[in-house]
Image: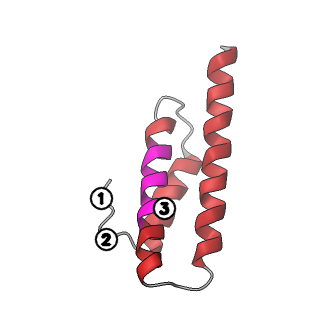
Amino acid sequence: MRTESINDSNWKEVYRKAMLETDQAKMPQHIDDARNAILGRVEQLLVDPVSGEHKLLKDALRFLQILQNEISAQERSA
């Protein structure tokens, strides 16, 4: 995932794809892609802040962590 030109809509699209993925084999990669896109956007916002987007980014990272924890728990119980 390239992060040098991540904008507001790019990270949201990658995040949405991760959250809507139903194939558990594909989920880890989508989660990683979304996390990288979000962190790339966070880096950009440190230089050029946009109000309100920080909370969206923080919430998105938190939900990705919850999803990743669920996948890990399911893998351990399988």
Task: Say which amino acid is labelled 2.
Answer: Ser
Residue in front for this viewpoint, 17 or 73: 73
Residue in front for this viewpoint, 42 or 10: 42
Residue in front for this viewpoint, 7 or 26: 7
Q: Is residue 9 magenta?
A: no
Relative horizontal placement of residue 64, taking residue 48 as reference (left or right): right
Residue 32 horizontal/vertical position (percent): 45, 45
Task: Check disc 2 and report its element: helix, strand or loop.
Answer: loop
Which residue occupies 63% across, 81% down? 52
Q: Which mark is residue 74?
A: none
Q: Is residue 39 magenta?
A: yes
Distance from Cα at disc 3 to Cα at disc 1: 11 Å
Q: Is residue 38 above or below residue 24?
A: below
Taken as a whole, is the magenta stretch helix, strand or loop?
helix
Residue 47, quarter of the rendered image: bottom left
Which residue occupies 46% across, 77% down? 46
Q: Which residue is mark 3?
A: 38
Task: Say which amino acid is labelled 3.
Answer: Ile
Q: Which residue is mark 2?
A: 5
Distance from Cα at disc 3 to Cα at disc 2: 12 Å
Magenta highlight range? 30-40
* Label 3 close to label 1 by CB (< 8 Å): no
**Sooner in the amino-acid sequence: mark 3 or mark 1:** 1
**Sooner in the amino-acid sequence: mark 3 or mark 2:** 2
Residue 77 horizontal/vertical position (percent): 70, 16
Q: Which residue is mark 1?
A: 2
For this orientation, the residue located farthest to the front is 46
Task: Check disc 1 and report its element: helix, strand or loop.
Answer: loop
